Amino acid sequence: MENEIFESLGLSPNEAKMYLSLIEKGESSVSEIALAAGIHRRNAYDAIQRLVDKGLCFQIVSPGENKYNAVDPDKLTELLGEKQEKLAAILPELKKKFEHRVASEEIYIYRGLEGQKNIWRDILRVGKDSYFIGAKGGWQDDRLSTARSAFFREANRKKIVFRGLYDYEMKSRLDLLRGFGGKGEFRFLPKGYSALNSGIQVFGDYVVTYAGLMLGKMSNKAVFFVIRSADLADGYRAWFKYMWDRSAPVDRVQLEKSYRHED
């Protein structure tokens, strides 16, 4: 796991292994580090020099073989900051190119938990209110907690409102509404009209059909069929309004009781 984190910061596998070995062992020669890291000594010399160049370790001149030691791990946060600065510098131009090439009508597919994160990014990019038919609290999946919190912070900043028509079965799982961190309103579909493992979301010109959505969680194999069409999105919003006007609102008293019960 640590090696993977180091590699995500731009270290090669050998550099990551050697840096971790230096952190654990302290002052060591290249041969000692190579042995501890399980790296061929010939490759270790190149790797240690790159670590020096990146400011992650320093050389200690000795009468025999020179030794090396690791710099304070806080240096890694500097590397991350540098990568973020470089990304921030090119991001405006990338976004401009992305917006330019986005077609007025298109169809594509996202998959899995990363797919849900992509949907959230699309919602934030579009910046329009969201409407959901057949909601099941799937966004509350514990595996999405970090991304979900970041999403709602930005959605609230952009004043995006979420309106959800929840499956009737959600009446017995009001606890799932507690973790919803956005600004929104909810109602329940009538009994017998729940859509098993599926749902529909509309925002801006986008219509997203969910497959693999369950009460309080999301399948690892969840599929998101995304359609961009202004006419289709307008149609779905009209149908949403029809269902919204005929659906039962959330019982706020019951909801507050469920909150107190959780406490």
Image: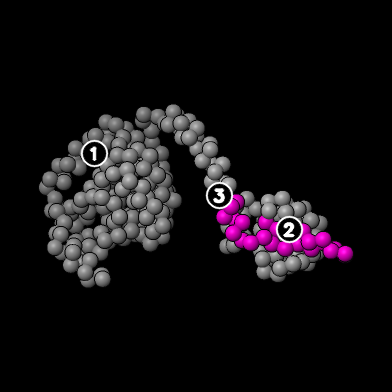
Marks 3 and 1 close (CB-CB < 8 Å)? no
Quadrant where the C terminus lies?
Answer: bottom left
Residue that carries the numbered disc 1 in the rendered image: 236
Asked whether the viewer can see residue 173, the reply is no
The amino acid type found where label 3 is placed reads Gly
Residue that carries the numbered disc 3 in the rendered image: 81
What are the residue bounds of the magenta stretch? Answer: 56-81
Q: Is residue 200 left or right of residue 250?
A: right
Whichever of labels 3 and 1 marks the residue nearer the N terminus, that label is 3
The foreground one among 7 and 88 is 88
Where does residue 48 sit, x and y in percent of width and height? 75, 56
Tag of residue 58? 2
Residue 178 is situated, as x and y percent measured from the top left of the image, at 26, 61
Query: Which residue in the rendered view is the most extreme toward the right?
Result: 63
Q: Quadrant of residue 6?
A: bottom right
User: Residue 36's spot in the image, x, y percent?
Assistant: 73, 68
Q: CA distance from mark 1 to mark 2?
A: 62 Å
